[in-house]
Image (tube, rainbow, N blue to C red):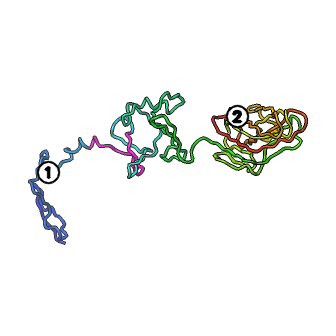
């Protein structure tokens, strides 16, 4: 290995090791001077950079990958780690509470407050939409510009129905003031949403709440001048609910009559609904039912 000799100022015999790959001990394009550096190749002295070093920000020695840096204390010189993560795609995570003021994308933030607490919202945009519970952007229910409410496929009010045409159900020797359920395998299912049908005229609701129950029947008796009641039996109670009872006096024997009723009834989860019929007279007539319709629609919450 060669030894180069250089002289700087009054110092002599200052030796520089040389590995043979570099042919000079010191190389510069400009004169080396000790004054204040001006040109790009001037020598920089420690005194020239000390003021800048005093303004450098220091850290605690470690950080979380992709974490946003925060100032520690009020000196403006110390940074610390944070829980806020910004990934390589610009997504944020680790955010706690957010306090906003002014506008967000042109919307006054203060106007959004009633949507985020228990306050009542007096107005909504006429094109407001309710999103599906699975988080997809397709609305389960929407309100169009004309005020028409629209439901997406599979959405809507819970409801169910069953019906029978010429079912041929009958009750011989019907006892006075005894309710009989109209049950027949010829009664078929209609639309069922959160409602099931046993195939014989009994509906079971799977959502608790206030249900509107509607029914109609055509029937006849084998005796004239019989008073007939029809109603809605809940949970196999053996009698009609006080809501929805209809009454008719049959003037002629073996002549078809129509009877129907409806009413709102609060039902628990898995409550059952059936149409029932009775005579309030003595004489044990035979009651025959030809047609039956039974529907249930959830219209509100229960109390």
Q: Give left or right: position of 20 versus 234.
A: left
Q: Is residue 82 magenta?
A: no
Residue at screen point 49% across, 37% down: 143
The residue at the point 45 percent across, 46 percent down is 93
Residue lying at the far right in this picture: please name it. Answer: 283
Q: Quadrant of residue 27?
A: bottom left
| Residue closest to the eye, 39 or 195 | 195
Q: Is residue 114 left or right of residue 86?
A: right
> According to the image, label 1 marks what residue?
40
Q: Which mark is residue 262?
A: 2
Tag 2 and tag 1, C-beta contact below 8 Å? no
Residue 22 percent coordinates (x, y): 16, 67
Q: CA distance from mark 2 to mark 1?
A: 95 Å
**Earlier residue among tags 2 and 1:** 1
Rendered location of residue 199, percent (x, y): 73, 50
Q: Which residues are magenta?
A: 53-71
Mark toward the viewer: 2 or 1: 2
Picture residue at 26% right of the left edge, 44% below the top: 53
Task: Point out the image quarter for the C terminus.
Answer: top right
Up/down of 15 relative to 144, above or below: below
Q: SS of the residue at dot 2? A: strand
SS at badge 1:
loop
Query: For this rendering, which residue is in front, 159 or 19?
Result: 159
- Is residue 59 a member of the stretch shown in magenta? yes
Q: Nearer the viewer, residue 95 or 120?
A: 120
Q: Give the residue displayed 69% in from the left and 48% down from the top.
A: 196
> Of helix, strand and loop, which mostly describes the magenta segment?
loop
In the image, residue 27 sits, relative to residue 118, either above or below, namely: below
Task: For the N terminus, give its image quadrant.
Answer: bottom left
């Amino acid at each position: 290995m060669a030894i180069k000799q250089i002289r700087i100022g009054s110092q002599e015999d200052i030796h520089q090791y040389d590995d043979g790959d570099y042919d000079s001990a010191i190389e510069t394009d400009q004169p080396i001077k000790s004054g204040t550096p001006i040109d790009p190749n001037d020598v920089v002295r420690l005194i020239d950079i000390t003021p800048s070093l005093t303004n450098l920000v220091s850290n605690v020695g470690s950080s979380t990958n992709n974490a946003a840096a925060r100032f520690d204390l009020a000196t403006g010189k110390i940074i610390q780690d944070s829980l806020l993560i910004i990934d390589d795609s610009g997504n944020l995570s680790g955010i706690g509470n957010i306090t906003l003021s002014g506008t967000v994308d042109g919307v006054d933030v203060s106007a959004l407050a009633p949507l985020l607490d228990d306050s009542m919202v007096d107005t909504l945009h006429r094109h407001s939409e309710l999103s599906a519970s699975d988080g997809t952007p397709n609305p389960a229910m929407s309100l169009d510009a004309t005020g028409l409410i629209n439901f997406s496929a599979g959405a809507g009010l819970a409801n169910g129905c069953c019906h029978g045409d010429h079912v041929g159900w009958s009750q011989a020797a019907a006892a006075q003031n005894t309710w009989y359920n109209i049950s027949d395998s010829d009664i078929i299912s209609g639309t069922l949403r959160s409602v099931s049908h046993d195939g014989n005229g009994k509906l079971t609701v799977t959502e608790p709440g206030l249900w509107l129950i509607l029914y109609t029947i055509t029937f006849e008796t084998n005796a004239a001048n019989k008073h007939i009641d029809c109603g809605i039996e809940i949970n196999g109670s053996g009698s009609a609910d006080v809501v929805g009872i209809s009454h008719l006096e049959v003037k002629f024997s073996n002549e078809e009559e129509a009877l129907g009723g409806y009413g709102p009834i609060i039902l628990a989860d898995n409550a059952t609904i059936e149409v029932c019929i009775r005579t309030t007279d003595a004489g044990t007539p035979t009651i025959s039912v030809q047609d039956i319709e039974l529907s249930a629609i959830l219209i509100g919450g229960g109390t």
